Image (cartoon, grey):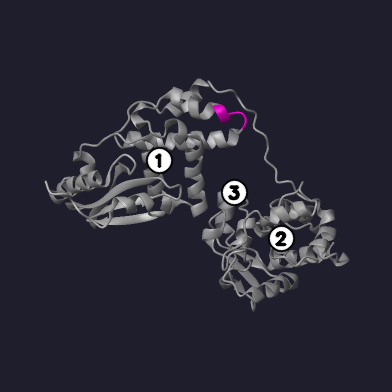
Amino acid sequence: MAALTGKLTRKLVDNLGPGRHGDGSGLYLVVDPTGARRWIVRVTVKGQKNRQGGPLRTDFGLGGADVVTLNQARERALEYRRMAKAGLNPRFNAKREVPSFEELAGQVHLDRLPTWKNPKHGQQWLNTLRDYAFPKIGRMPVDSIGQPEVLMCLSPIWTAKHETARRLAQRIKTVLDVAKSSGFRTGENPVTAVKEAEVLPKVKARPSHHDAMPWRDVPAFYAELAARTAVAAKALQFTILTACRTSEVLGMTWAEVDDEARLWTVPAERMKGGVQHRVPLTDEMLRILDAMKELRSDVVFQGQKRHQPLSNMSMLMLLRRMGCGDFTVHGFRSTFRDWTAEVAGAPREVAEAALAHQFGTDVERAYARSDLLEKRRNLMARWTAFVLGSQEAA
């Protein structure tokens, strides 16, 4: 049989960067940010419709590029296309090899990309498996992984890095659940069996607190911070004043700022809760933003690379250089919340809205459609005055 041809070459397969690279006729090489490489083929099954009534287009994994060669991938893709052209869904008619754990995990990650809140969360999901599971069970077929293999991944970090181990267990379970639903496994998920058997030691959960600076110390700290001219210092000033999260401030763009309305609108896709958040801007906040305009960047707080934000460690490292390493940037949100309760006497719903927290029961939230912007505008003005050392703030 004549060799199948396409756009890709063996050299390209080995060297292409992250992304989805087409070979032609629906065959793609998918390269993850981790460097893992795998084949997928997209086919349209003749005469079959999806739930919306359109043509049934489906992606199928053909295996990792370190195991399946380019020619083998082309041959398998051809087999899938022939079945689809004949009206046969390859999912039920192809002779499939059982994928390795790493191959299937990569496919699960790819399938769930549209559901991640942001690329960072999706990458963290895969990184946990890469660091703690792939070295031990990555090359094992998913149908051969049982309780001993799961324990082999979890035991070394179960007590020392318990939160990481807990997340690892959940992610291994997800991959094996997908394997079962895809017909590659049968029986109980071994992660569930390990948990129910309680073979791992119980670890007492430690409350995770973001160490917060006492609110009484903030004015003196802010005065010292305001004397600095670095972008990280300005970003930390703005973070303290707005009581926003690090990611919300560092991802801020000028398109989100309305100087005339004195408003910063953080879009839903950048919020932890997935809901748009409006932040009233005070004179001090606007003064900081005016200084940042001189950078002429797409982002407000530009880092070392042009039009790219500061590193998410930049403000924390600044705290350490200033001798405040016991505190965290996120802790200033707790500082603000303590001040609203102990000094400002702000109503709970106003203080929680300022932090973009949900509050109340589902019914209460259904009726509380306002984000209390004007009440929050007054609260943030008082907080700014306090941070600047004004006696009127109390």
The prevailing secondary structure element of the residues shown in magenta is loop
Q: Which residue is mark 2?
A: 236
Q: Kindly give the residue lying farthest to the bottom in the view shown.
A: 260
Q: Earlier in the sequence, mark 1 or mark 3?
A: 1
Residue 128 is situated, as x and y percent measured from the top left of the image, at 51, 40
- Would you place residue 264 above or below residue 83 in this image? below
Position of 33 with respect to 322 (left or right) is left
Element class at badge 3: loop
In the image, which residues are magenta?
Answer: 156-160
| Foreground of the two, 4 or 142 | 4
- Please tell me the numbered disc located at residue 361: 3
Residue 158 forms part of the magenta stretch: yes
* First reached walking from the N terminus: tag 1 or tag 2: 1
**Disc number lying in front (3 or 2):** 2
| Amino acid type of the residue that numbered disc 2 sits on in the rendered structure | Leu
Mark 3 or mark 2: name the one nearer the start of the chain: 2
Residue 218 magenta: no
Residue 347 image offset from top left, x and y in percent = 73, 57
Question: Which residue occupies 74% across, 46% down?
Answer: 211
Q: Callout 1, which amino acid?
A: Ala
In which image quadrant can residue 20 be found? bottom left
- The image quarter containing residue 218 is bottom right
Image location of residue 214, percent across then percent down: 81, 51
Q: Label 1, label 3: how many angstroms apart (C-alpha)?
A: 37 Å
Find residue 154 and report its horizontal and vertical position in percent.
Answer: 52, 29
> Is 205 drawn above or below residue 382 in the view shown?
above
Q: Which sits in the foreground, 203 or 141? A: 141
